[in-house]
Image: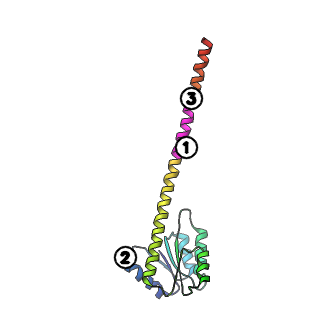
């Protein structure tokens, strides 16, 4: 889990909430969007809890940059936090690629529920990726079987043609 906020006290509070949840997340922290971007370039995070309003690179831009660099099959579930809960800020964050938005000050129960919702979505995403891999593998096996079947059919047709040719020359 990546936790990004320019206020240490906010990061500490969120870590306490995660501990109360019984979370087993390995938590990486950053105090700026730029520091967080350096982290996401070297590590894939399942969940990022990011403050929208930070000096330098804000949370929406961090989300946008992360989405651009997402590795194939990797997905980070973004929860943006902001003291600005108005429609324009929410839509701006969602258009940047965020998955959820929580207004500050936030209720612990609400943040907990939103993190759990993100975990469910990630589990489903991982399951879909696993099943896609199975389908790709099955498709490759079917393709190989079809090629072998076509070769066998061609050999059978050649044998029949040879037999018919011999029979017609004898008769």
The residue under label 2 is 22
Mark 3 vs 1, N-terminal side: 1
Residue 107 position by quadrant: bottom left
Q: Is residue 56 left or right of residue 47?
A: right
The stretch drawn in magenta includes residue 142: yes
Nearest the eye: 88 or 59: 88
Q: Residue furthest front?
A: 87
Scheme by which the image is coloured: rainbow
Mark 3 vs 2, N-terminal side: 2
What is the chief secondary structure element of the magenta stretch? helix
Q: Are dots 3 and 2 in contact, CB under 8 Å?
A: no
Q: Position of residue 139 (x, y in %)?
A: 53, 48
Residue 35 position by quadrant: bottom right
Within 10 Å of disc 2 (Cα), the crowding (few <14, some 14-19, many 20+) is few
Nearest the eye: 159 or 31: 159
The residue under label 3 is 155
- The part of the chain drawn in magenta is 140-156
- The C terminus lies in quadrant: top right
Q: Position of residue 103 (x, y in %)?
A: 52, 84
Q: Position of residue 37 (x, y in %)?
A: 57, 75
Mark 1 vs 2, N-terminal side: 2
The residue under label 1 is 143
Which residue is painted at 56% across and 65% down in the image? 71
Which residue is painted at 55% across and 40% down in the image? 146
Q: CA distance from mark 3 to mark 2?
A: 64 Å
Q: Position of residue 136 (x, y in %)?
A: 53, 51
């Amino acid at each position: 889990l990546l936790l990004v906020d320019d206020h240490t006290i906010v990061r500490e509070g969120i870590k306490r909430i995660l501990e109360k949840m019984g979370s087993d997340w390995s938590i990486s922290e950053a105090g700026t969007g730029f520091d967080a971007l350096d982290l996401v370039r070297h590590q894939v995070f399942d969940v990022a809890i990011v403050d929208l309003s930070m000096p330098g690179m804000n949370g929406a831009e961090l989300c946008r940059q992360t989405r651009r660099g997402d590795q194939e099959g990797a997905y980070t579930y973004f929860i943006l936090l902001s003291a600005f809960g108005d429609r324009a800020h929410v839509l701006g964050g969602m258009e940047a690629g965020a998955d959820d938005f929580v207004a500050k000050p936030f209720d612990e129960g609400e943040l907990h529920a939103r993190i759990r919702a993100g975990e469910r979505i990630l589990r489903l995403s991982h399951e879909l990726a696993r099943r896609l891999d199975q389908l790709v593998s099955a498709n490759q096996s079917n393709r190989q079987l079809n090629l072998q079947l076509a070769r066998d059919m061609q050999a059978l047709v050649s044998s029949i043609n040879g037999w018919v040719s011999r029979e017609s020359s004898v008769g």
